[in-house]
Image: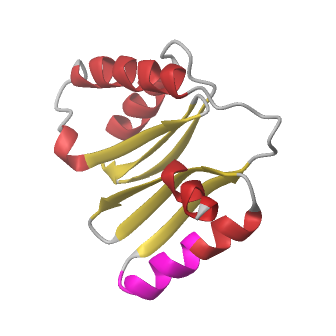
Amino acid sequence: DNDSKEYLNINILVFKDRILLTGYVNNAKYKKIALNRISAIDKDHEILDEIVVLNSDKMISGFNDYMILKRVNIRLKKIENFNPNNFRYDVVNSVVFIMGDADNKAQMDKITDTISRTLGVKKVINYIRY
């Protein structure tokens, strides 16, 4: 079934009481199906929907996103008191999505600033709590 291939481009990140859906589909119908299935399976988590519907003429560079993710990993590890177990993040089309628990606002700001200044990052979508 060709429709099932659309789901291969959806990433699911879970942290505590939240589920972050990122990625892309070619049709809004597939996004709705994915959201409905996640909602039906898990009613206890807040669902953060960041699935993008792209026209077929738009290209996603998986390699570029992978390289950005690696750069972000390296830079975040250099932040004092950064605990990677407290965060989940993903990169889709040069946009970094991050969720987790920071110790305070200053740490959250440091994390998001560090990510935004990483080579290749176009935007940071912040779901960090403190």
Give the residue drawn at x 53%, y 49%.
Answer: 9
Magenta span of residues = 34-44
Q: Can you say which quadrant of the picture contains the N terminus? A: bottom right
Was residue 41 drawn as part of the magenta stretch in this picture?
yes
Which quadrant holds residue 122? top right
Closer-to-camera residue (107/67): 67
Magenta portion: prevailing SS class:
helix
Give the residue drawn at x 40%, y 26%.
Answer: 69
Give the residue drawn at x 29%, y 46%.
Answer: 87
| x, y percent for residue 26 | 72, 52
Q: Can you say which quadrant of the picture contains the C terminus? A: bottom left
Which quadrant holds residue 71? top left
Was residue 113 drawn as part of the magenta stretch in this picture?
no
Left or right, 77 with reference to 91 = left
Residue 116 can be seen, yes or no: no
- Count of numbered badges drawn on the protein: 0
Position above or below: 39 against 16: below
Left or right, 92 with reference to 84 = right
Position above or below: 128 against 83: below
Position above or below: 72 against 32: above
Give the residue drawn at x 39%, y 84%.
Answer: 41
| x, y percent for residue 28 | 75, 64
| x, y percent for residue 40 | 46, 87
| x, y percent for residue 19 | 40, 65
Closer-to-camera residue (11/49): 11
